[in-house]
Amino acid sequence: MVEQPSEPLRRKVAELKRAVDGFEQVVQYDYSGRNAIELDIYKNACIQKFEYCTELGWKTVKRILDEQGGESPAAPKLVYRHYFLNFFSDEELTEALFQTINDRNLLSHVYKESVFDEVYDRLPKHLSTLKQLVSMVQKALGE
């Protein structure tokens, strides 16, 4: 458990929770009956929410590590690995968090519609992972 979490850390965790809740609302939206343009807009909204939550997630964990007095790594996967090795995470969740980073990187560096569609299809799994992350960091703060 994080001893004496700062107010900025508490706000960051609350922001992560709100972001993941918003991601969940978008993923669960019933887009049936929409035309191709509306479906494309919907998919892009889902992907954008995913990318935002993924960035906010690892940066929140980095903030926790920073507040614990150690030097935290700068790279997302290293942040999650350090957290796993030294604090609160389990290996299965850590691997799932690595996959969120991998997919975020694919979206940023591989410009193929097929990759976009593959990541889009994995969004429900990523949502579950990010919800677990929220629970984990809330528990670490004693919330």
Image (spheres, rainbow, N blue to C red):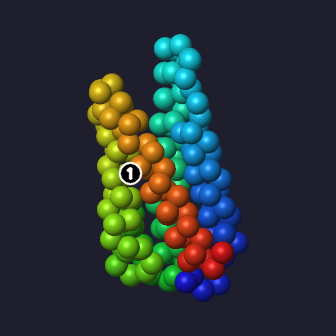
Q: Position of residue 26 (x, y in %)?
A: 58, 38
Q: State the residue in front, 82 or 44.
A: 44
Q: Amino acid at mark 1?
A: Thr
Residue 120, image quadrant:
top left
Q: Quadrant of the N terminus?
A: bottom right
In percent of the image, x 45 and y 45: which residue is there? 124
How many numbered circles does the render carry?
A: 1
In percent of the image, x 62 and y 45: which residue is there? 22
Q: Residues within 10 Å of mark 1 (few under 14, many from 20)?
A: many
Q: SS for tag 1?
A: helix
Q: Position of residue 11 (x, y in %)?
A: 68, 64
- Whether residue 138 is visible to the viewer of this picture, yes or no, is yes
In percent of the image, x 66 and y 61: which residue is there? 14
Q: State the residue in front, 103 or 67.
A: 103
Residue 82, image quadrant:
bottom left
Compared with 99, 106 (above or below) is above
Q: Which residue is mark 1?
A: 100
Compared with 53, 82 (above or below) is below
**Relative side of 85 to 31, left or right:** left
Q: Quadrant of the C terminus?
A: bottom right
Compared with 12, 86 (above or below) is below
**Relative side of 66 to 93, left or right:** right
In percent of the image, x 38 and y 37: which residue is there? 121
Q: Position of residue 89 (x, y in %)?
A: 42, 74
Q: State the residue in front, 127 or 83.
A: 127
- Whether residue 54 is visible to the viewer of this picture, yes or no, is no
Q: Position of residue 49 (x, y in %)?
A: 54, 41
